[in-house]
Image (cartoon, rainbow, N blue to C red):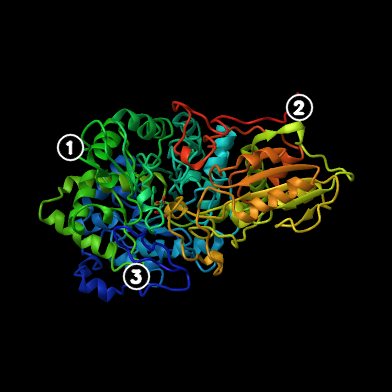
Amino acid sequence: MLSLQQSHHRPIGRRRSRKTRLAVLSATTAATLGLAFLATPTADAHHATRHDRYGHHSHHSQHSHGPAYLNPKLSTKTRVADLLGRMTLAEKIGQMTQAERIDIDANPSLITTYGLGSILSGGGSTPAQNNAAGWADMVDRYQRAALATRLGIPMIYGVDSVHGHGNMQGATVFPHNIGLGATRDPKLVEKIGHVTAIETRASGVPWVFAPCICVARDDRWGRTYESFGEDPKLVESMETVIDGLQGHPGQLDQRDHVLATAKHFAGDGLTTYDASKAGTGAYPIDQGVDHVTRAEFEKYALSVYKPAIKRHHVGSVMPSFSSVDFTDGLTDGQDGAVKMHANRELITGWLKGQQHFDGFVISDWRAIRQLPGDYTAQVKTSVLAGVDMFMEPIQAPNNPNGWDVFIPTLTGLVNSGQVPISRIDDAVSRILTAKFNLGLFEHPFTDRSLQSTVGDAAHHALARRAAAESQVLLKNSSRTLPLHARADRPVYVAGSNANNIGNQAGGWTLTWQGGSTNVIPGTTILDGIKQYAPGATYSADASAAVPSNAAGVVVVGETPYAEGFGDVGGPQWAYDPGDHGVPRQPQTMQLSAADRTAIDKVCSQAASCTVLVVSGRPIILPPEVVAEADAIVASWLPGSEGAGVADDLFGTRAFTGKLPVTWPRTLDQEPINVGDANYDPLYPFGWGLTTRRR
Ligand code: GLC
């Protein structure tokens, strides 16, 4: 995909299409970088690891008095201490290093050479065979390279399963978090976490960069849909998704659980909209600055991390790209805005110190390069702030370097005494603890026994239930809903989002940004309607004649986006493999002209008129639209089972959803949140009519 050169204000090109592969670094490059010593096994290697014909890793020493770290009967604490004591500095720093799969896919021996501790898939970075078997083959191939290192430490693979394993074709794709917040159903969300863990781990991936426990306060933010809502208590109630993902403590080594990541620490959803950046190619609000008091930050940013750690035992935390500038005091002893990745007071002081977080902190995508100073300063600041593992993809030619420079830079900082070995040992101990708890030393390769459940009927039934429970009925005059499929009431369907599974799935689906032409298994909203009204007329632009006495349904809303590209006034991502060259729309939080036309046509001709809004956040509905629609539904981003929306429309399920965010009257009301003074939205936080029969 087109990438924009990284500069201070322009978004960095972060993902590459599968078509263009990285000219990978060769082992010779590693040698020239003076890292060849990494690859030479030392004489004191206590054991040779053997791979039986299944590629399973067996330590002959396990049958003798092998090293303690390989003995599963010993405590994790003991095993970590033993292994740490055997590691060279280079091996320790390797464990703190995360590469992107594109950097090493053509030459996995780089994992062995550098002793890389982790690999990730960025959004849309998928194996050629993009199914569970293809993923497992890929991850296991990388794992073999990791096990070929001197100490045979398994690598940990991470991916953004933010609404199911969205990157993987065939995965069950659930509603994005904003729709789950609308369900107010913590048990449902826990089940979704569990199914997500099953489908992710079956593909070989034991770690997900989810959930975002962001509290979205300004809906112009492109990541609003990744938030469960604007109220920290609501977000907290949805953290049951972590239990679904991880299981209870001690269950992380099971085939149906993965390590979760609470992100993005902290205050990613509290940034202030900077109108001067709108239309300039920079992000007006994503990755911005929280201008808040310490009390506000405590309430809206930090509070949600306490239960994530203490009650749900989340295994990793990812800092935010954003910064915080306390309006009532210094941040980390510094005046002005401090990047969260540089925030020692909050990562080491508050998260690890006060909250006793015992997992590990993973940096966001090349986020440390946004810190002040040169790269050495950036690495030093973030390591000392308490970051443990570094997501430093190369993705050349987009970026001139990444983890290949991170490793010698951190090595130099330790050797010169600027970073104490105690900090390195703390980071590595945290990372190894997670790997032992995940069972990666005993079972480094994929357990494929649940691959048959990926995308199966039971998982899709859950997605359909979630889509139904996430629907919020905003208006229902003269009991227009539920519709009854009757011969004398033909159904007429229009609108840009009635029959587009890519749009209803949204970002982080097959590709990073998602795409209107991304196709995944499932049902569109139109498919669902036709299950109830097989003879329904469909005309996206409402150009077809509207039968008399018709029940009109107009499905409008947004096209997919992710991160800052979804900011109102944010840059347009030139194209995405999922778009097949279809130019992307700027995000405005307004109805498109085509959708407005479709609403006007249908509502003026049909006997009744229902408007469904498929979007990652509230869309501004002009007063005339609110007046002419008999019923209005917030459908959010329902994911792969649009049929769940039809279940509410036709009364199989009652509408029960409640607004997780305030629905503004106009854009200039943003940010507008429950509790504000002079609170005068179109529909308030918590609003939602029901069609439940008395
Ligand atoms: C992105 C996002 C983060 C994601 C990471 C890896 O920049 O900020 O949420 O987990 O990169 O894809």
Residue to which mark 2 is pinned: 693
Please say whether residue 520 is visible from this viewpoint: yes
- Residue in the foreground of this view, choosing between 210 and 443: 210
Q: Amino acid at mark 1?
A: Gly
Name the mark on residue 32: none
Extreme residue in the top direction: 694
Secondary structure of residue under mark 2: loop
- Estimate the spatial distance between the alpha carbons at disc 3 and disc 1, rounded to whole Å: 37 Å
- The correct choice, above or below, for 480 with respect to 103 in the image is above
Q: What amino acid type is highlighted by mark number 2? A: Arg
Q: Dot 3, crowdedness within 10 Å: few (<14), some or many (≥20)?
A: some
- Image quarter for residue 471? top right
Q: Disc 3 or 1, which lies upstream in sequence?
A: 1
- Tally the marks: 3
Q: Which residue is painted at 47% across and 69% down in the image?
A: 18
Q: Residue furthest left?
A: 416
- Residue 651: horizontal and vertical position, in percent? 76, 36
Q: Is residue 88 left or right of residue 235?
A: left
Residue under pointer 3: 396
Q: Residue at x 37, y 68 (%)?
A: 104
Q: Nearer the viewer, residue 159 or 583?
A: 583
- Residue at point 67% right, 39% down? 632
Q: Earlier in the sequence, mark 3 or mark 2?
A: 3
Q: Residue at x 53, y 41 (%)?
A: 178
Which residue type carries mark 3?
Ala
Which is nearer the eye, 206 or 609? 609
- Mark 1 — residue? 333
Distance from Cα at disc 2 to Cα at disc 1: 58 Å
Residue 227: x and y, percent?
A: 48, 41
Q: Hey, which quadrant is residue 478 in on the image?
A: top right
Tag nearer the camera, 3 or 2? 2
